[in-house]
Amino acid sequence: MTATTEWIAVDWGTTRLRTWAMRGDEVMFEASSDKGLSRLTPEDYEPALLELIEPWLGPDPVDVLACGMVGARQGWHEAPYSTVPVHTLSEPPVRVPGTDPRIRAFVLPGVRQLKPADVMRGEETQVAGFLNRNRNWDGVICLPGTHTKWVQVSADEIVSFRTFMTGELFELLSKGSILRHSVTDGWDAGAFSTAVDDVLSRPEALAGQLFGLRATDLLEGAAPGVARARLSGLLIGAELAAARPYWLGQQIAVIGAPQISQTYAAALDRVGAQAALQDAQAMTLAGLSAARAMIGATK
């Protein structure tokens, strides 16, 4: 394995650690674990990483480039934020001191916005990867997930962005509220589309519409997946209503896992907006690969 590993890419989030052994831009091997930031203390980071990448290491040190929450204050090594408007990859990765001699570890900085206050770590790397593959692209990039980002991009700069806790709200409501008794597995595309339309026409009624999921289930019964799809549609529809200044009349790209990206594309289609779907892993690796060219001066 070690003979083909030129460098190692790492995406280290709150809940997951993902690693790839790279040769140029080609993935040779990959490994992941559930040892994200939420499960680690500062002294746990290097052992958690070495546990995955040990088979890829040899006698000579290998560059490790990491993005995500690994650079947060509570992470392995804090990397400062760049402030918008900012050119993607404007700041070089930050060297992690005192690591195992077989690795040279670097952490990519995050991006912050002062007004309204907002921050991102990891998504900026996906944006950089997308722009590296799509030169002179202007528009808005949606990055759905636990905390969905809407990022305005122009002239290869992140101009502004806004974060929505839609994914986390779905998790809390579907598993930690009264709705957990009604939200079952499955999916109903029609129920999703209707819910998006309902909340876009009357966003102020969202709280009542949410309880309506439980009441409808109790009084009428619901086919499996209807409540889940409708809950998703209400929350994503409310997000689209609030994010209207970002997507209205803009060229849109959605970067995420296939299922959630397709869900957002379906919601955008309800408002007449078309989105180009991009794979999150591919964009992350493209961004880390572009950042690799910047680390020579920091070794």
Image: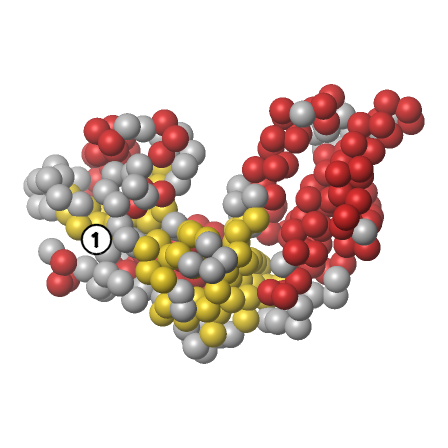
Residue, far front: 115
Residue 112 left/right relative to 293: right
Q: Is residue 118 above or below residue 12?
A: below
Q: Quadrant of residue 248?
A: bottom right
Circle 1 packing at 10 Å, graded few (<14), some (14-19), many (20+), is many
Closest to the observer: 139 or 130?
139
| Residue 63 visible in this rendered orientation of the protein | no
Q: Where's residue 202, x and y in %? A: 81, 51
Q: Where's residue 58, x and y in %? A: 12, 41
Residue at position x 80%, y 27% from top? 214
Closest to the observer: 83 or 166?
83
SS label for mark 1 = strand
Q: Give, as a three-letter code, the residue at label 1.
A: Val
Q: Name the residue under label 1.
A: 94
| Residue 71 visible in this rendered orientation of the protein | yes
* Quarter of the figure that contains the C terminus: bottom left
Q: Quadrant of residue 18?
A: top left
Residue at position x 13%, y 39% from top? 99
Residue 216 left/right relative to 188: right
Residue at position x 72%, y 35% from top? 228
* Quarter of the figure that contains the N terminus: top left
